[in-house]
Image (cartoon, rainbow, N blue to C red):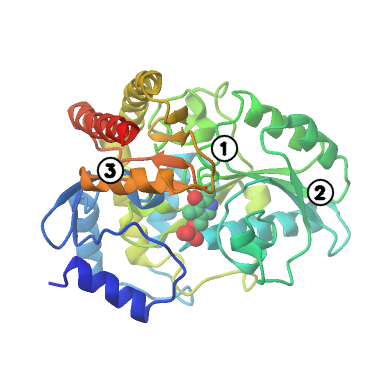
Amino acid sequence: MTSTKDAIALENKYGAHNYHPLPVVLSKGDGVYVWDPEGNRYFDFLSAYSAVNQGHCHPAIIGALKEQAETLTLTSRAFYNDVLGPYEKFITEYFGFDKVLPMNTGAEGVETAIKICRKWAYEKKGIPENEAKIIVCTNNFHGRTTTIISFSNDTDAQKNFGPYTPGFIKVEYNNIDDLESALQDDSVAGFLVEPIQGEAGVMVPDEDYLSKAKALCHKYDALFIADEIQTGIARTGSLLAVCGDCTCENHCERQPETYVKPDILILGKALSGGVYPVSAVLADQEVMDVIKPGQHGSTFGGNPLAAKVAIAALNVVRDENLAVNARKLGIQFRNKMNELKEKSKLINTVRGKGLLNAIEINDSPGSSTAWDICVKLKENGLLAKPTHGNIIRFAPPLVMTSEQLDECIKIIEKTILEFNRS
Ligand SMILES: *Cc1c(COP(=O)(O)O)cnc(C)c1O
């Protein structure tokens, strides 16, 4: 087996340096745990940016993968396959939409949503050709394509990758007045938003922000588009973050008063439980029907392997009550972190929802404090990664037990308090 030292050296020598990983190499995963080649075990508090909500190598998902891999993997959409239809029925019923458009990565899902929204604007709303605009938020993260980075305000993500795609307006996140003034422009086609901004540092908007935003979108005849690639699939303590406080494990028609149903919903990451790239764009008939044969597609999108894996991954979420567990454990986590905040000057803020949480370290974003804390956490058996310099995100797999979470909280407490003294 490749050692930690050798694995890091090989990546440094032969890989493009487009990431700056924590110095740990992982060679095995099971549930909430991962191991390095030397056999050290860690709690995974990143879950591959919330792709591994169901836990590493969940047997039901891996079982579905193996079975389908030995039967049929890829046909392209030039032909029908016998798994895609059942998957489309399953996922649309699961989330309560008429139609799904299957893709692979999250960024492709976002690109797909942008294309659907623009086409809807020209063909349904009647915006003159090439004039449609989509409103996005400051500090958004929607992926890495040339179009998506065009409306990022992260300089690393954007600089020297231009010329940038036009047609996007930026408004301040969680500022409803800012959104309303932008919506007055007749050429606005839609509003693309993360219900909680994960990459920005787990920024939770005001409780009524999303419902007000959707109401405004409809007032001005624009589509409300939710990017739930990171927040969706039980991560924030409900099936989707737009479900609000509803914990039903199916789609949210049972509690319409808390559910802010998007016109377009984008899912990825945990849609496969992290075993395969699967993303999806969901919408009702009148929106999805703007896409006709030949106008959009993907060789791998909707392949039978992805379809089987996604069904299995969504069944795990429902069968194991992961939304309810995420909600319960999230409260336990934030309570303990708030107690720790009282004991340590290192912690500025504790925030989050369900098991998508962050602590803000009391130091400048340019400092190495959060990184150094993450290195110490690693040495103590827990993996987390800083985002935006001084913020540490904590997002373990949702299959964690309350006892395991207690153990993790002790590791974090010990690390922070020791760090205080050094
Ligand atoms: C991860 C992420 C994406 C991009 O997904 P990829 O699979 O990396 O392309 C888009 N939006 C949000 C909110 C994400 O967290």
Name the residue nearer the viewer: 81 or 327: 327
Question: In the rendered structure, which disc, 1 or 3, sits on the residue that comes first in sequence?
Answer: 1
Q: Position of residue 380 (x, y in %)?
A: 21, 42
Q: Is residue 170 left or right of residue 62?
A: right
**Point 16% across, 69% down: residue:** 3
Q: Can residue 101 be seen in this view?
A: no
Task: Specify the quadrant that holds the C terminus.
Answer: top left
| Picture quarter with the N terminus | bottom left
Instruction: Name the residue tied to disc 1.
Output: 195
Give the mark, 2 or 3, whose residue is nearer the N terminus. Answer: 2
Viewer-side residue, 36 vs 94: 36
**Distance between the Cα atoms at labels 2 and 3?**
46 Å
Q: Distance between the residues labelled 1 and 3?
A: 29 Å
Residue 39: which quarter of the image?
Answer: bottom left
**Quarter where residue 27 is shown:** bottom left
- Which amino acid, by three-letter code, is at mark 3? Leu
Q: Which of marks 2 and 1 is nearer the N terminus?
A: 2
Residue 377 marker? 3
Residue shown at 69% from the left, 34% from the top: 214
Give residue 160's position: percent from left, percent from top. Answer: 67, 71
Circle 2 is placed at which residue position? 188
Q: Can residue 1 be seen in this view?
A: yes
| Number of the front mark, 2 or 3 | 3
Separation of residues labelled 2 and 1 (CA atoms) = 20 Å
Binning the other alpha carbons within 10 Å of mark 2 as few (below 14), some (14 to 19) or many (20 upward) gives many
Where residue 418 sits in the image (x, y, percent)? 27, 33
Query: Counting other residues with Cα less than 10 Å from the Cα at mark 3, is it few (<14), some (14-19), or many (20 or more)?
Result: many
Q: Residue 102 carries which label?
A: none
Residue type marked 2 = Val
Looking at the picture, does residue 3 appear above or below residue 91? below
Disc 1 marks a residue whose amino acid type is Pro
Viewer-closest of 376 and 260: 376
